Amino acid sequence: MNEAAHEEATARPMRLVTVAGPPACGKTAVVAKTCAKLREAGVSTAVIKFDCLQTRDDALYQAAGVPVSVALSGGLCPDHFFASNLEEAFAWAQHTGADCCIIETAGLCNRCSPHLRGVMALCIIDNLMGIDAPEKIGPMLRLADLVLVTKGDLVSQAEREVYRHRIRQMNSRAVIRHINGLTGQGCQELAQILALAPAVATVTDMKLRFSMPAAVCSYCLSETRIGARYQKGNVRKVEFGHRQEGQHGE
Amino acid sequence: MANEQAIASITVTAGRDKAGNPEPWDLTFRTGEVVALLGPTGSGKSRLLSDIESLADGDTPSGRRLLLDGQAPTAEQRFALHGRLVAQLTQNMNFVLDMAALEFVTAHAESRGIADPAAATAAARQVIDAANALAGEPFAPHTQLTQLSGGQSRALMIADTALLSWSPVLLLDEIENAGVDKRAAMRLLLGSDKIVVIATHDPVLALSADRRMVIANGAVAAVLTRTPAEEALLTRLATQEEGLAALRHALRTGAPVRAWEAFFPTP
């Protein structure tokens, strides 16, 4: 690509969507099926998959004809790794010429959320996680614009309704939808919503919706031994036997 | 719930079949009526049900549109109803929670906006009583959901959906082999003020429905009501079902199983 083409590609606004959810809830199946629906509607996509150790999900996207790039955090905190690589990820997606970039993040801890201000934010969870799950999942659900619930075909109507109610209690403004990543039921509608995601020219200077947890302790620096004498830096000690309040710091 | 509203009928406007031929009729489904959908796998039952569920607006492969009480839904109605119009019950569904039946149904009642705990518990007890009237073997309110038998689970799901679910449309998908008193379940559902649609292969359920829709090649090919001959057939089939239920009960309780005629009298 010559310089002029490069500049043109990087200046072109592109729709951007962040997708977060616990492992094995069906994120990739839903996103891959939705990419196919978007293509039918004339919207091309590029997918970036952030994961921790390994993933074979890129094969699934490739089979669906969707350009995909995988980023593995390995020994680093996956949340911080995601934030540190976002500019580069977005630039890669711009170079694919896609109309819409979908960033799928797995392995984020429940304290974290990849969602950005001004960017459409999805959270995917499944109906098999128990009805307390919406409370436990934290900011990736509380700060999402759209909450998608998978595996609803396996549980009773009552469980689906109670689950939905609990999601609503945690996030009063999100659109909540049931979706089936295996049959694709609901993916057509999701594609219509994603086609409305705001287009952005750059992610530089954008802000996360939620600050990430602090790190930098001995264990960040590869300490493996257990014991207070080995712990330095940002260490917080728990008073066991006392009930702790949940933390919802914004 | 603030956006709760009664819907007395839904209409699916005529679309087109898989070959693009126009469907002959608009179809209207009303509360207090049971409609059976019949047709082999792949004939288009799911397509019709998904058109209803997604509030089709000419934007699905069938080209159908969904009307509520004869009117195209407003943007606000669409938003409020999306994903909630249809409550669904299928054979694949299970309770996955490890909770006592009463505790769980109470949680469901609370999620429906019954704030007073005593009222929520009372509503939940009513659901459990209704479920026990459908199941062969009654269960206690403190039974764990995961310990319910297949029939008890299904009975609880049916009773809960009929009495507590918000959705105005109830879709039952092939629940005939669930070990539930089918006709009692029908009566409960008919009294629930819901629009009931059953996808079935069961002759008793099909003939009990007020109307039967036969689906072929992605479109509704025929809409039938019971003829007098079918009425007579249904009566005999129902007697036979009662005989089977009595036989099942006799076997379960160790009662002496007598001659064929004791269970299946010739009319």
Image (cartoon, coloured by chain):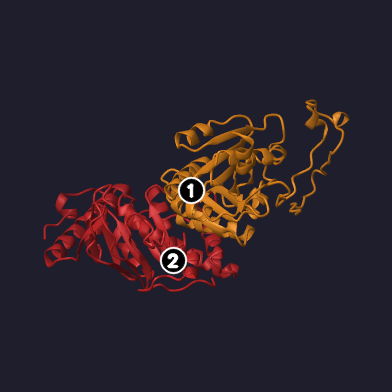
Chain colours: A orange, B red
> Is residue A94 found left or right of B25 in the rendered image?
right
* Whole-number angstrom distance, CA of label 1 to CA of label 2: 43 Å
**Residue A182 visible within the image:** yes
Amino acid identity at mark 1: Val
Amino acid identity at mark 2: Leu
Regarding mark 2 in the picture, which secondary structure is present there? helix
Picture coordinates of residue B68, whole percent (x, y): 38, 71
* Residue drawn at point x = 80 percent, y = 25 percent: A225
Vertical placement of residue A88 versus B149, above or below: above
Q: Nearer the viewer, mark 1 or mark 2?
A: 1
* Quarter residue B53 falls in: bottom left
Regarding mark 1 in the picture, which secondary structure is present there? loop
Vertical placement of residue B187 versus B98, above or below: below
**Residue A138 visible within the image:** no
> Is residue B244 found left or right of A122 in the rendered image?
left
Query: What residue does disc 1 label?
Result: A43
Picture coordinates of residue B82, whole percent (x, y): 47, 62
Whether callout 1 and callout 2 share a subunit is answered no
> Is residue A123 found left or right of A159 in the rendered image?
right
Which quadrant of the rendered structure holds the C terminus of chain B?
Answer: bottom left
Query: What residue does disc 2 label?
Result: B163
Q: Pointer 1: residues within 10 angstroms few (<14), some, or many (20+)?
A: some
Which of the pair B224/A205 is nearer the observer? A205
Which of the pair B117/B209 is nearer the observer? B209
Vertical placement of residue B79 versus A155, above or below: below
* Quarter residue A5 falls in: top right
Vertical placement of residue B3 versus B15, above or below: below
Query: How many numbered callouts?
Result: 2
* Residue drawn at point x = 59 percent, y = 67 percent: B117
